[in-house]
Amino acid sequence: MTDNGSPPSSTIDQIEEPSYSGRPGHLAGHHEVLHKITPARLLLRYLVLEGVTTVFSIPGGSMVYVLDELRGSGLTYVLPRHESGGAYMADGYARVHENGFGVIIVPAGPGATNAITGVLNAHYSGTSLLAVTSEVGRAYFGKGFLQEGVDCELDVRAVYQAANGHSVLVDDAANFSTLFQQALRDARSVPGVAAHVSLPVDVSRQELATVHFPVSTDQYRVVPASSDPHGVEVALDSMLTADWPLIFLGNGCRRALRDQAVRDQLIEFAERFDIPVMTTPGGKGLFPESHRLSLRNYGLSCNPWTEAYLRAPNEENRYDALLVLGSGLGQLATSPTLWPTLSWDRQLIPTTSFIQVDLDQSAIGRAFPVTQGIVADVGRVVQALHEQSRHRPVPYSATQRRQRIEGIKSGLPRPDPRRAADRPDTVEPTDLTAAVNDILRDLENGAHVFVDSGNCVGWSLRYLRIDPPTEFHISLAMGPMGFAVSAVVGAKLAKPDLPCIAITGDAAFLMHGSEVSTAAVHKAPAVWIVLHDNTHAMADQGLAAYFPDKDWNHFYNIGRPDLAAYAAALGAKTWSVTASGELRRALEEAIMQDGPEPRVVVVAVDPTREPPYWDYDAVPLVPGQR
């Protein structure tokens, strides 16, 4: 609106830029010339240019001009029940949508601070996300205006700056395009990050006489796609001369391996030379876990196959070359348990070659000493490995590796066991994961599985079997409870034709279960599988491990809520499961049936059953203790 209350008008001309004929790399197209346009309207123009179709937002008085523009923009407006839930939804949406970009727009003050946990989590998960927070008018800065976020007691810009690195306050409409483009460059970089823009309400309605608006995102940002052919050749030599090489995939491979051709090239390379593959928890399933060369995931709740390959029975069989693709090798990617003394487990260091590939050079050598670092796009490196290796001879050691991997898999218990529950009216968690595996196996087009924080992480990492095109999503850098509860809604909105499933604990479900209502309003039939043990079981069990002389059983009980009734009141179809025999039918109905309603399956599990967080040989609690 203008100062007299009427809507601002804008007109569009087009001007031809100089053609720079004969000078490659210079613009030869058009800009749109926009007249009498406000930052509120420009913001929406940029989002449309970026291919955004859905915005997650909670309204507020300091964003009225943005809200007015959103109403007529044609973008889908999703109203979450809480700002942090909205940020988790934007994260989940970005993870599965082809555009790979999430947007959350929230009001000033508490709206901005409520959203920050979800924005922070997206940032450290490598998700491209833009957070726009509104702000009170500049004339009121420093006066204690309602929800002001720039005075000495609350500086929202600084809070986001400390959380995710890029944060800016637009202090004048003339700066908007420059600052907003920079936020988009940062957010949509590779790897992705979260960026924050704070927009005061009076700035949002300032009218700019003329703006030269880009007609393509290429005019202000570019996605890196670099390679290092010589570095790849050196790495290939190291892997093929090793007797016991290993490939380690992180979540940073996800974008590249979604390309079927690139994934096939990686599989063909591994198969040709019989090189086993393991993943970080965040990368679980990027390499098909049913494949004969898959050792499944290392790190937290790792598959015993990875331990068996790394812990050779003698020095001659000690693994000697590691190729890390797309992982910064953080704590839970490299520690088999939650014991802090085993963080960045040194057994991961091979005897000869430690090669780390990442587009982010700051991740290389950060956690472990490397013998070779390659700063390059993972997809390009996989393509180069495949091409350069096609005419290389297969060494004799490949046969030995194949035999060793077969021996490891046949000699250890199967990774998806079924067993009867120890307590009546409960389900064994491994029976639950086995039932989920059966259903996932039958989904021709795959699914998106989101796993929350808590004991559900341990059960899912160890016992779920994930094969592409099914994708597994987790957030272990920050590990917030409630992430998956909300993120699955965003995912279902992004992929309405695929099953989107959240596996969560009851305590986390209570934190953000209100977002089931958001799914109901938008007719997004997401599925929640809730492990119901009436406590924060991970806390109970963890404290019992630290302080075994005390009784922690159900110390953090949550009051026996009727979660099925709660979910039904929010608009969901619900199932309550108290026996393994009921599992398959309930899960099939929830995941496979048509209909617009969200679905919640509440599964009673034994609170005393412990996932594989603590079962490690001779693990000291603190130095000098067991």
Image: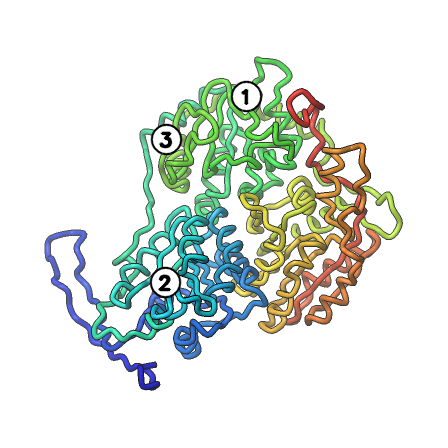
Residue 20 is drawn in which quadrant?
A: bottom left
Task: Report whether residue 12 is seen.
Answer: yes
What residue lies at 39% left-to-right and 76% top-to-bottom?
Answer: 65
Q: Amino acid at mark 3?
A: Val
Mark 1 or mark 2, which has the lower sequence index? 2
Residue 44 lies, in percent from the top left, at 37, 70
Quadrant for the N terminus, please. bottom left
Which mark identifies residue 50?
A: 2
Residue bearing mark 1: 319
Mark 3 or mark 1, which has the lower sequence index? 3
Q: Amino acid at mark 2?
A: Glu
Which mark identifies residue 232?
A: 3
Eye-nearest disc, 3 or 2: 2
Quote the CA–CA distance across marks 1 and 2: 45 Å
* 174 relative to 219, above or below: below
Quadrant for the C terminus, please. top right
